[in-house]
Image (cartoon, rainbow, N blue to C red):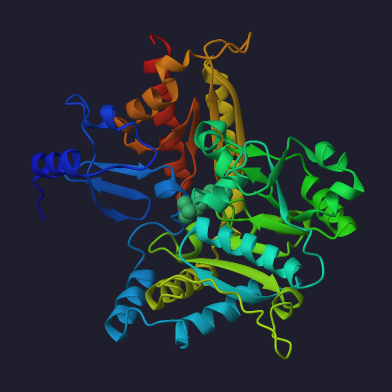
């Protein structure tokens, strides 16, 4: 199939508005957007026939590569049978089967109920509303505040954004926020008085590694400490595994690395293998029971979206979980994770423009700097992270920075050879741009 790139780019620049994008820069005649038209495995192809490694898993969503035949077939068959039916008042086969599978993945936890929605932000909204309503109707209505961590990212809708700790994105909406306290560390939280804690509905965390903060791993043991703090104070724990879920950190869920289970487990991005949107909020039976009607009482959770438990999405998610089993995806990860660690160490040794590299599983952040000895950063006006990613594109790697942190988070199906190629592309990009900024 051939594409008229000029025309497509013209239409895009004339009619579209992109997320997280300074549009004056995007529409500038000097900017040539890539139009991505197809994908196979970790490779994406643009409208001019050039191919690239998908180095950020299409914004952290893709797990088994593009066009995985197992998932494609499941989507095709489900779409042909029926694509969507309402979940208000009806059930459907893939939703019921997927709920069972998700609960089985959380064996050893008390997570027993699955509430579906559409994306990461809605999975968080669901957890927040459930937490507040639970306390309202179960004798502790004063528990109406949330705690989140500095630099946290939990989504862009107003509720989820209230938890956000990235000033650049969220400060302007602060006055519209739900009551939320921000903690810089576990010590901050432990300094809360007992009376403060009785006003808390829930604490939200991106377990094991914060994403938008720049791929920042938490100190080992922090999640366990947070779990016991929540238990001590009767506060719910919301684990936002929207980025970390489905193998990204080396285990199916990041929480498993500290043998911790939350009261609300929020899943989205990788749940369908990165093919179609779908999200889930999982809770224990005791939370669900807090919504069961007493005679004469209305305790219903009045929340839902038109596409809740979309049949194609649930079928894709089931197929993605099949791929995990059939291809022993988790079992193959340690060798890849080690390969990435070696490559990052080599890159760091080879370049004076890297302040540090951070890694958790197949998630990596490469922080650029002008001078490693002094820790001096590049001036923000250089947009060095973005420049390096643009340069890496010429070496067949697509990714996107967070400020001057270059993200590398490939689909789990990437080969060691492709990991080496990707890091080489970044090395060349860094050399080209950082040496003559
Ligand atoms: C992406 C992300 C979200 C938001 O998910 P959307 O599907 O983009 O709404 C929330 N939390 C984390 C940790 C994320 O990475």
Task: Quadrant for the C terminus, please.
Answer: top left
Residue 36 horizontal/vertical position (percent): 25, 47
Is residue 116 left or right of 72 when viewed as pictured?
A: right
- Tell me where residue 186 sits by quadrant: top right
Q: In this view, does 79 lie above or below 1?
A: below
Q: Is residue 410 above or below residue 394?
A: below
Q: Residue at x 76, y 39 (%)?
A: 219
Is residue 135 left or right of 407 when viewed as pictured?
A: right
Q: Which residue is drawn at 59% across and 81% down?
A: 100
In-front residue for pair 116/129: 129
Q: Can residue 404 be seen in this view?
A: yes
In-front residue for pair 25/370: 25
Number of marks in the rendered image:
0
- Tell me where residue 71 sits by quadrant: bottom left
Residue 396 horizontal/vertical position (percent): 31, 36
Looking at this view, name the residue that lies furthest to the front.
296
């Amino acid at each position: 199939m051939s594409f008229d790139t000029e025309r497509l780019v013209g239409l895009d620049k004339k009619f579209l508005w992109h997320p997280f994008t300074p549009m004056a820069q995007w529409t500038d005649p000097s900017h040539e957007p890539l139009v991505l038209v197809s994908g196979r495995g970790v490779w994406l192809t643009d409208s001019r026939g050039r191919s690239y490694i998908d180095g950020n898993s299409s914004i952290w969503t893709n797990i088994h590569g593009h066009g995985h035949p197992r998932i494609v077939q499941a989507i095709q068959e489900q779409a042909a049978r029926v694509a969507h039916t309402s979940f208000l008042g009806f059930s459907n086969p893939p939703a019921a089967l997927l709920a069972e599978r998700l609960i089985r993945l959380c064996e050893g936890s008390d997570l027993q109920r699955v509430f579906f929605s559409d994306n990461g932000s809605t999975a968080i909204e669901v957890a927040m509303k459930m937490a507040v309503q639970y306390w309202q109707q179960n004798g502790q209505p004063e528990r109406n505040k949330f705690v989140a961590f500095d630099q946290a990212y939990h989504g862009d809708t107003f509720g989820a954004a209230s938890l956000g700790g990235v000033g650049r994105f969220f400060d302007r909406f602060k006055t519209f926020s739900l009551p939320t306290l921000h903690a810089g560390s576990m010590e901050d939280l432990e300094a809360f008085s007992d009376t403060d804690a009785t006003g808390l509905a829930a604490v939200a965390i991106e377990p094991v590694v914060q994403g938008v903060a720049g791929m920042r791993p938490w100190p080992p043991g922090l999640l366990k400490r947070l779990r016991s703090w929540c238990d001590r104070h009767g506060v719910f724990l919301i684990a936002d595994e929207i980025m970390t879920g489905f193998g990204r950190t080396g285990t199916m869920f990041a929480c498993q690395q500290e043998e911790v289970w939350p009261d609300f487990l929020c899943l989205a991005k990788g749940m369908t293998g990165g093919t179609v949107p779908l999200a889930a909020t999982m809770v224990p039976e005791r939370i669900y029971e807090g919504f069961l009607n007493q005679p004469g009482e209305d305790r219903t959770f009045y929340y839902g979206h038109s596409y809740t438990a979309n049949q194609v999405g649930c079928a894709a998610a089931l197929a993605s979980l099949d791929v995990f089993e059939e291809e022993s995806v988790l079992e193959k990860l340690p060798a890849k994770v080690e390969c990435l660690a070696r490559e990052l160490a080599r890159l760091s040794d080879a370049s004076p423009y890297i302040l540090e590299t951070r890694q958790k599983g197949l998630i990596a952040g490469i922080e650029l700097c002008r001078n490693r000895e002094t820790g001096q950063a590049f001036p923000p006006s250089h947009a060095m992270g973005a420049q390096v990613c643009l340069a890496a594109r010429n070496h067949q790697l697509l990714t996107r920075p967070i400020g001057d942190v270059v993200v590398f988070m490939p689909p789990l199906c990437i080969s060691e050879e492709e990991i080496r190629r990707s890091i080489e592309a970044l090395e060349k990009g860094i050399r080209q741009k950082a040496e003559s900024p």
